[in-house]
Image: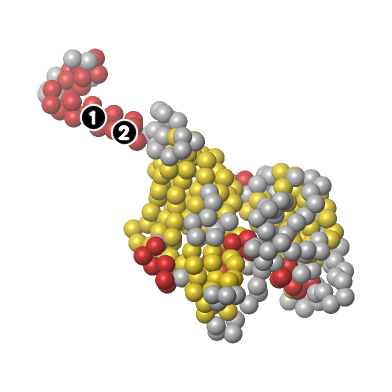
Amino acid sequence: MSSMERAFMQGPAGFPGAGLFSGRSAARALLLLLAALLAGCEGEITMDLGTELPADPDIIQVVANVRGLEFTNSSGGSKTLEFTDSQAIDFIDLADDNGLLRLFTDEELSEGTYTGVRLLFDEDRADDAFVSLLDGTQFPLNLAAGEYAPLRFEVEDGESSSESFILVLDLRKSLSFDDDDDEYTLTPVLRTVVAADASRIEGNVSVSCPAGGDLSAGAVYLFQGRDITPDDIDGAGVEPFATAPIFTAQNGSSFFYALRYLPEGNYTLAVTCIGNDEDPLEDQDLKFRNVINVNLDEQEILTRNLP
């Protein structure tokens, strides 16, 4: 008999019921204690989902059924977290500052080092996915798995851990249109940031556009690193880390942007007056201008006007 089992049977010194524990009750209590200890070795993860708008401002809905998340780990394995029932999500609704959608709260992941995460779509309801335009036109939406977004979450043996992440779907990078088949395809391009560390870059835009250009059709692109030569989204060479459309202020005569949910680091900012022309399947010259470097700290709201 182990010393722990003996202690359960004898009871604490001076306790009125000392010595009354049976061997069976001691074993049961020991199992409960071990279960509690093992439960403390799980990692708890919380995930919110947000989006960045597509290039086409006429798109007002991008709807698909999501059934959960898939995590990959450093050993080459994977782990899924799934909803009881899949959820129909309109990703456009998640594109404003109050649009984060809670996917999971304090869900447990077993021991391991998790390195990536991606969305899981409901294959049984794939035909329900669609894109709607401002004029009421609706198109079918094909769903692709997409790559894992980098993530770092470690659950060590004998230790508990807890972390909260924001998962961001960039629709400018993810949504493409097939003119031949008259349909859209969503191939999720995602990034993650620790929720407590998330930062933001925002400001006014007063860039002079070439003749025929208009800032209301523009966008701001963010690249990781300093002195990066900006490029469009085409799956080759330098790719933007994050993007944001240029919005028209309520007065109708000024413009602003906001790049949200960013980790700390050094970045290059660039403006294009023809951001609405972006097609992630084609190599285009977006005629970037006003290229500048910025440094972003954790939890910082950095105001950087782009004159």
Residue appearing at x 21%, y 19% in the figure? 5
Q: In the picture shown, does residue 300 fall above or below 158?
A: below
Q: Quadrant of residue 213?
A: bottom right
Return the x and y of residue 236 as percentages of the image width and height.
68, 53
Answer with mark 1 or mark 2, whichever residue precedes in sequence: 1
Q: In the picture shown, does residue 247 fall above or below 174?
A: below
Return the x and y of residue 181 as percentages of the image width and height.
54, 75
Dot 2 crowding, Cα within 10 Å, few <14, some 14–19, many 20+: few
Return the x and y of residue 51 as percentages of the image width and height.
58, 61
Q: In the picture shown, does residue 142 fall above or below 259?
A: below
Dot 1 crowding, Cα within 10 Å, few <14, some 14–19, many 20+: few
Residue on which disc 2 sits:
36
Please tell me which residue lies in front, 49 or 291. 291
Residue appearing at x 41%, y 34% in the figure? 111
CA distance separating discs 1 and 2: 9 Å
150 sits left or right of 209 in the view:
left
132 sits left or right of 81 in the view:
right
Return the x and y of residue 15 as percentages of the image width and height.
20, 22
| Element assignment for label 2 | helix
Residue on which disc 1 sits:
31
Please tell me which residue lies in front, 299 or 288. 288
| Element assignment for label 1 | helix
Q: Quadrant of residue 279?
A: bottom right
> Furthest-front residue in view?
180
Q: Is residue 294 visible?
A: no
> Hey, what amino acid is under mark 2?
Ala
Q: Quadrant of residue 286?
A: bottom right
Q: Is residue 125 visible?
A: yes
Residue appearing at x 44%, y 56% in the figure? 120
> Hey, what amino acid is under mark 1?
Leu
- Describe the colour scheme in one phrase: secondary structure
Please tell me which residue lies in front, 219 or 198. 219
